[in-house]
Image: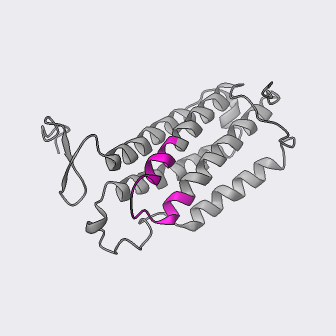
Amino acid sequence: MKIYTRGGDAGQTSLVGGRRINKSSERLDAYGTIDELNSFIGWLRATPATDIRTSDALSELRMVQNRLFNLGAYLATDPADLKEGPDTPPAGLDDEDTLRLEQEIDRMDTELPPLRAFILPGGCEGACRANIARTICRRAERRIASLEGIHPVAMRFVNRLSDYLFALGRYLNHLEGRPDVEWEK
């Protein structure tokens, strides 16, 4: 399989199923943002400091990357071409994945001081990367919300993922002994 096809040279690309769309389409923007998020999560997983290595985050983030790939494939498919129909959740993504993120958020939260104010992104390298991934995740969520016929499982997962990434940033700072930096109004 060749890496280049020359099929996109005129500003169009193919969805799964073969339908051609403009590269400026909302659908392409949505799954492209999911791809960007997945790349940033890969960068987060590669954080060299001990903060990420001493947490359970590596296995959770690997699960997330796989689910994002599934979500990207779903978004790259024209709803009319979904074999199971538009009312079926994305293959390889279900509410158990969202529940798993919630459980991880709750687990990390038990070790963190209560959140009493807005906090500024920053701290250790892993926390900074988690916060960049969080903001990309929020953008992906906005892009997905602009599409018609998206299954609620997809929206719930992306929404909870951004919460997870926020909690992870706080948790990684906690592991490094760095306190939250509260926003000064």
181 sits left or right of 53 in the view? right
In the image, is residue 70 above or below residue 111?
below
In the image, is residue 143 above or below residue 117?
below
Query: What percent of the width, then of the height, locates residue 54?
Result: 71, 38
Q: What stretch is highlighted in magenta?
A: 139-156
The quadrant of the picture occupied by the N terminus is top left
Q: Which residue is drawn at 13% across and 41% down?
A: 7
Q: Is residue 72 magenta?
A: no
Q: Quadrant of residue 135?
A: top right
Query: What percent of the width, then of the height, locates residue 178?
Result: 80, 27
Q: Is the magenta stretch mostly helix, strand or loop?
A: helix
Q: Of 28 and 1, which appears nearest the observer?
A: 28
The quadrant of the picture occupied by the C terminus is top right
Query: What percent of the width, then of the height, locates residue 15?
Result: 24, 54
In the image, is residue 101 above or below residue 32?
below
Q: Which residue is drawn at 29% across and 45% down?
A: 25
178 sits left or right of 19 in the view? right
In the image, is residue 176 above or below residue 38?
above
Q: Of 47 and 73, which appears nearest the observer?
A: 73
